[in-house]
Image (cartoon, rainbow, N blue to C red):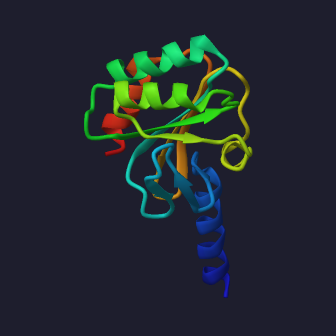
Amino acid sequence: MMRCFSIALVALLLLSCSNTTPYPALQLSTYEGESIELDQNTPLTLLYFFSMSNPVSIGELYKLHKNILDEEIDIIAIAIQVDRPPNVAIIQRKLLIPIVIDNDNRISPEFGGMQLTPAIKLIKTGNVLYSDDGSIDYEVLNELIANNK
């Protein structure tokens, strides 16, 4: 009995020490109608939340596309506060990154909510591995990507 209790305690401790945050399964649709599932089977993916009304966060999306060294990682941009959808199409065609519009505020709260500043979430198999908002440290981000492939 004591051994079972000890094993359960160790398992609980290991689970609580994990520095990942789970997210629920989500079905997304890009601006162009492509379906994307984020769930327990999602490979390493970088989510970039940005506001179409914030030129800085749009500029950061272009920098993100240029500075991520691993071309195998999936990048999904999630646009909030979109007042002119045609602008999303222009960005999506230039960068070839799928863009999901979250005007109904359905996606952002599942990842902790977003401000007007850009925010990134590195996710894999149902968990958020890394989260940051504001200025992106590409050296740290590229190292995390390399270590979690």
Q: Position of residue 67 (x, y in %)?
A: 34, 19
Q: Position of residue 4 (x, y in %)?
A: 62, 82
Which quarter of the rendered picture does the C terminus lie within?
Answer: top left
In the figure, is residue 145 to the left or right of 40?
left
Q: Position of residue 65 (x, y in %)?
A: 37, 24
Q: Is residue 78 above or below residue 90?
A: below
**In this view of the protein, which residue sits in the foreground, 52 or 64?**
52
Q: Is residue 23 above or below residue 120?
A: below
In the figure, is residue 66 to the left or right of 141?
left
Residue displayed at 50% across by 13% down: 59
Residue displayed at 43% across by 40% down: 98
Q: Position of residue 8 (x, y in %)?
A: 63, 74
Q: Is residue 90 above or below residue 9?
A: above
Number of callouts in the render?
A: 0
In the figure, is residue 35 to the left or right of 16?
left
- Residue 145 figure quarter: top left
**In this view of the protein, which residue sits in the foreground, 113 or 101?**
101
**In this view of the protein, which residue sits in the foreground, 126 or 25?**
25
Residue displayed at 58% across by 62% down: 25
Q: Is residue 109 above or below residue 133?
A: below
In the figure, is residue 122 to the left or right of 1?
left
Which quarter of the rendered picture does the N terminus lie within?
Answer: bottom right
